[in-house]
Amino acid sequence: MADILYLDHAATSPLRPEACEAFLRASEQASNASSVHSLGRKAKLALEEARNDILTGVGAVGIGGLVFVSGGTEANALALHQAKAYDYMVVSAGEHDSIFGAVAGAEIAPLKASGEVDLVAFEALLDRDGRPFVCLMLANNETGVINDIAKAAALVHARGGWLHVDAVQALGKIDIDFEGLGADSLSLSAHKIGGGQGVGAFVYNRDHTPKALITGSGQELGLRAGTENIAGIAAFAAALKACHKASDDLCSAQNSVETALKALSVTILGDEARRVPGILYIAQPDWASHLQLIDMDMAGICVSSGSACSSGKVKSSRVVTNMGRPDLADKVLRISTGWTTKAEDWQRFYDVWSKGYEVYLKRHTKELV
């Protein structure tokens, strides 16, 4: 088998060298940021430097507070914990399972065929008495489609509500300006940008006073009990500082492959909307997701059929169904690039996928005959 080609960065991105170095350096200190001795103070300094670096990286310095958590799922759970102070909840039909699966009884804002949240329908859902708590992701984790957060924020705030934004898949791919977005809170995760698994952040507007989800001690200004993972947090900050926009060569290679795939009657989900670079979600109605995955894996290419938060299962995509294409929901494949990807990797993917599809069609045609 040829060298394995990893094109599943949207699931997790390998640890960056900068993050690894920061992790090892912080680990060597081996101290608790709550300790008052000299090594404890050094750990506390490293913690606050990382906090400032991440707030800077998302345009939240001066306006935002930050709680370090175990990842995007906990950050979303902490956000949902704030909803108790509001009168009703609205979430988009495209939200990550960590939100969508935890909000029984919420109003669901539909998606347009493009994959964007339908803001006209969204506004209609807000046309009622009471203050809403709203969850709307910045970039969808399957399609990469970008939502108009600033416009949604204006609608939510006109009704005295809170807008939480899952920015996990947007981080490191596009510029994030917390103040410009107008969000009340953001979820972030380190492992999506090569910062290591098990660390995330909940960023909030300091006009609010969030209520802790995990209580019992005073870490993180009383907003999240438990000893901070200083090494993991240092790696997170280092990874974010190392992020840069996808190169022109990489974007051009992706565009070329998208054009070639369309010539094979492949549907690109979200093609009519703004998308983050490095996520391509395709569907071929003649070829099931699990068969595509097997073919790619046998050729040494790691991709996925969508969200990786499903215990390793291959299942139909709720997002694609909610885009009005249930016929394609079990025919999708997600290709996602990151810091290890080279422009030529896109061509290798296309060559393998198109050959595999050709072989599948020939075999399938013979079976039908």
Image (cartoon, grey):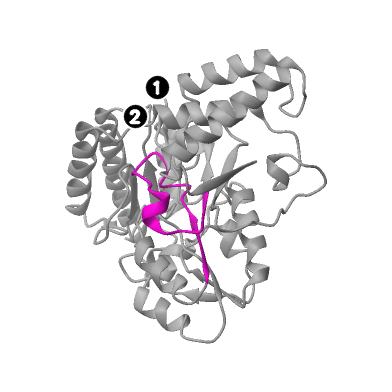
Which residue lies under the disc numbered 2? 341
Can the viewer see residue 85 in this picture?
yes
User: Which mark is nearer the camera, 1 or 2?
Assistant: 2
Q: Secondary structure at mark 2?
A: loop
On the rendered image, what quadrant is the C terminus found in?
bottom left
Q: Which mark is residue 59?
A: none
Q: Nearer the viewer, residue 77 or 322?
A: 77
Identify the residue at horizontal 64%, vertical 62% (top origin). 82
Neighbor class of circle 2 (other Cα within 10 Å; few <14, some 14-19, many 20+) is some
Quadrant location of the N terminus in the rendered image: top left
In this view, the residue in front, 72 or 321, is: 72
Whether residue 340 appears in magenta in the rendering, the answer is no
Dot 1: element: loop
| Amino acid type, callout 2 | Thr
Residue 126, position as x, y percentages in the image: 47, 80
**Numbered range of the magenta stretch:** 161-187
Write the residue at 64% across / 49% down. 74
Q: Residue at x 41, y 55 (%)?
A: 138
Q: Is residue 195 visible to the viewer in this orientation of the structure? A: no
Pick whichever, 80 or 96, lies toward us.
80
Does 11 sit left or right of 286 as displayed?
right
Residue 302: percent from the left, percent from the top?
Answer: 44, 36
Alpha carbons under labels 1 and 2: distance apart: 13 Å
- Which quarter of the figure has residue 300? top left
Q: Is residue 76 above or below residue 33?
A: below
**Residue 3, numbered circle:** 1
